[in-house]
Amino acid sequence: MGLGLNRRQISLLILAICVLGGSLFYIRFFLARPMGVGPAGPEVGLEGFQDVWSDRQVMLLGLGDSVTSGFGADSPSHSYFQRIFQNPADEFAEMQGKCLSSVLPNLRQTNLAISGSTSIQHLDRISSMKPFQKDTFGLVMITTGGNDIIHNYGLSPPKEGAMYGATWQEAQPWIDNFRQRLLQIISAIKTLFPGGCEIYLADIYDPTDGVGDAASIMLKYWQDGLKIHTAYNAIIREVCDSEADVYCVPLHANFLGHGSHCSQFWLDTYRHDDPTYWYYENIEDPNDRGYDAIRRIFLRTIIENSRLRSTAN
């Protein structure tokens, strides 16, 4: 015996199927953000850790915002800064021995990064520090500028240091000031190390995977946000290219495809090998796997550029 459905009932059934299918599609590809498990980020080769780099006194110094302070990591030992310094007790097998303390026997560390801080505060903090001893070489890890852009999440009128919601025109003097401030930060860091230093400055990742749709990360619409973000990153890269011993750590490129659109296979940023979300619940900081990826990106940049590898002083 047939169902005996009339035309109206058939139409309603088809509509229900379409709505259900559309809802499931939206949930799967727009709302679902799988975190994944295990290692994350690019491979770090063993060749950089087979020999001691230098017996110099070296200070690993962390400066900047919550990314360097490690907010969102499962434990303090899982921050990118601490994992660069030494492997945690539960380190992945593939990363055992791949840390700076394994190749720099006289390495010390201090992390002065502060969650929520801006580039304005970073300059003030660094300018107030006392120089290190002349026999100490500095390896400086710094993340700065991200809070300048994202604060105060559109909850207050935009201003320098908290420009969320600003128009391109409003942001112009603040962007220009960031360039000058970044140069001052670098100059101040170099003054801290009369024995020489290298500065590893990260560019700013984008939780929207280059789409610029603030709604996907639960923030207010911001028409010029992506344009301003791009300008900040251009400044970071220009400064790194123009300043000796300053190297850009490419977080932005490596994090594309791991943000709010990580499940959308039709986008150019889709990561077939690991289509997972690398951000913490507050959106602006990495989760534990994100921090694993960041330490790998920093380590690869250090291995590629550090002159400590070529001179055992």
Image: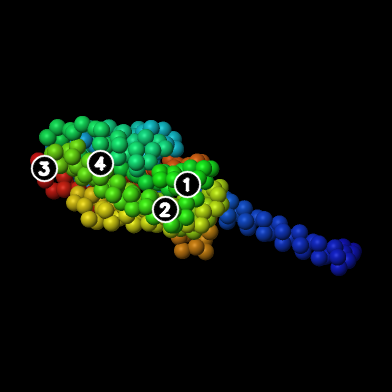
Q: Residue furthest left?
A: 313
Horizontal side, residue 104 vs residue 256: left or right? left
Q: In this rendering, is residue 84 above or below 227?
A: above
Q: In this rendering, is residue 61 above or below 182?
A: above
Mark sitting on residue 158: 1
- Determine the residue positioned at 23% across, 49% down: 246
Q: Crowding near pointer 4: few (<14 within 10 Å), some, many (20+)?
A: many
**Element at label 4:** strand
Location of mark 4 (residue): 140
Question: Mark 4 and mark 3: span between their CA atoms?
Answer: 19 Å
Q: Earlier in the sequence, mark 2 or mark 3?
A: 2
Question: Mark 2 and mark 3: span between their CA atoms?
Answer: 46 Å
> What amino acid is labelled 3 in the image?
Ala
Location of mark 3 (residue): 312
The mark closer to the camera, 4 or 3, is 4
Residue 90 is drawn in which quadrant?
A: top left
Location of mark 2 (residue): 171
